[in-house]
Each structure stands twice: as structure tokens, then as C-alpha cells.
Image: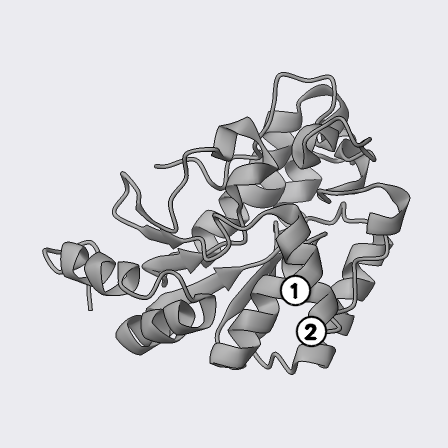
Amino acid sequence: MDISSSDNAAVIAQLNAVQDDPVRLLRKAHELLGNKLAVMSSFGAESALLLAFVAEADPNMKVLFLNTGKHFPQTLAYRRELADVLGLTNVEDIGPSPEQVSDRDPTGELWAFDPDACCKLRKVEPLNLASLPYEVLVTGRKRGQAVTRASMTIVEGRADGQLRINPLAFWQAQDIQAEMQRRHLPPHPLVAEGYLSIGCAPCTRPVDGQEDARSGRWSGLNKTECGIHIAG
């Protein structure tokens, strides 16, 4: 099925009909789209719940993990732990080519003086390339993470014709934590240190209770998104 064709509205309608149940939503999306669908996961602070829903829907669903080369070691260990605990069998690491990194960030310090260029090299371009076979990408974004995400929907079309599914769009942080605890899902080890939104190590700091979860990302910069969720 070509999700960017005239069938787009019909697919969206079918997905919207089950959007209140994340597992049913993922099953329906996979039923309709098969190998044209992939899940994006950062294996971050709240990733375990979406991945648990994915495992319940179909543990062989494709999961894409952006290995930027700048992650905390704890995140890489957590990625392996969660995949094992949940029985996910189709997790693929994607990232920039060594040649591109050597050419455009030879010292590994691009993040310090041009974070947009660093995100483009290490996140946006690798995901754009890896997502070419997929007409639908599932994300773990939530409205409550930041004001830039306050109006997002569970099923959203993009200007480039791709579809994004955000099963947790309306979930609150406390509800996610409660469900993770109910399911006995292991937390990301950095959450206990105040990291509520976890990206690359150089551009992520802990936050206090007065800040939204993503305020620790690119702190002090006029930057709130890496670019992978900006409509094309």
C-alpha cells in the first residue's frame, strides 16, 4: 500500500478508530502496512513503555535506533537490556557513516560550535536514508514533553507524504511511570540522576522539577528539536 496515495485518508481513518489503545493501534498499523512501517526509539527515559506495546503487538516489528556515536554509555547498555527483556527481535542500529564523520566532524566537537550541523550529520541524514523504505514511522513523542509538541496528534500526516504515529501523544509523565512500574519495566539508569529526556551526552543535562522534560536538551541554545520530527 502506498500511504502517500489516495488511500492515505482511509488508512488514517482506520488508525484513528483504534487510537485509544496503543497495542491495537500498533497491530492495526502493522496489519495495514507490514514492512512499510518502522518504530523509532531513542531508548531514552520513557522509551520502555512504547517498546513494551510494540513487543505486545508484534516483537518482530522493525525498531530503528539512531546510534549517533555520542550517546551516554548507559543508553547503549539500556538499548541492549530492553531489547532482551522485551524480546524485541528486529532492532536495527543506524547512524552516520565513518567517512561522513571523518570529513565533517574530524575532532568530534561539531556539537560545541554548530549543534544543528551535528544533528544533521548524526541524526537527520542517517534517519532520512534509513527510513526511505518506510511510509509510516512510529514515535514515542508526547504532548507534555515540551511546548513545541503541545498540539501533536496520535496519527499525523506530514508534508512529505509520510505518516507519523505517536501512540503516547496524550499520555502524561506520571501515567507513563505508573504503567512502566505496573509492567515492571526497567528504567533508564540516568533517570534517577535527573535526566528526564535523554539524547546525546554533550547536549543533555539533568532538569529540576520546575522545567519541562526537554529543557535539558541543548540547554542555553535557541534549539529544541534535532530535526528528525520536522515535517519535510
Identify whether 152 is placed above or below 184: above
Left or right: residue 6 versus residue 203 is left
Mark 2 lies on a secondary structure that is: loop
How many neighbours does mark 1 have within 10 angstroms: few (below 14), some (14-19), or many (20 or more)? few
Residue at 73%, 79% (x, y): give it.
85
Q: Real-space Cα distance between discs 1 and 2?
A: 6 Å
Residue 55, quarter of picture: bottom right
Which residue does the numbered mark 1 point to in the structure image?
Answer: 179
Mark 1 lies on a secondary structure that is: helix
Give coordinates of residue 41: x percent, y percent.
59, 58
Identify whether 83 is placed above or below 208: below
Residue at 77%, 49% (x, y): give it.
71
Report the disc number at residue 54.
Answer: none
How many neighbours does mark 2 have within 10 angstroms: few (below 14), some (14-19), or many (20 or more)? few
Find out whether the residues at labels 1 and 2 contact each other: C-beta distance under 8 Å. yes
Please name the amino acid that badge 1 sits on: Glu
Which residue does the numbered mark 2 point to in the structure image?
Answer: 183
The quadrant in which the C terminus is found is: top left
Give coordinates of residue 106: x percent, y percent.
75, 35
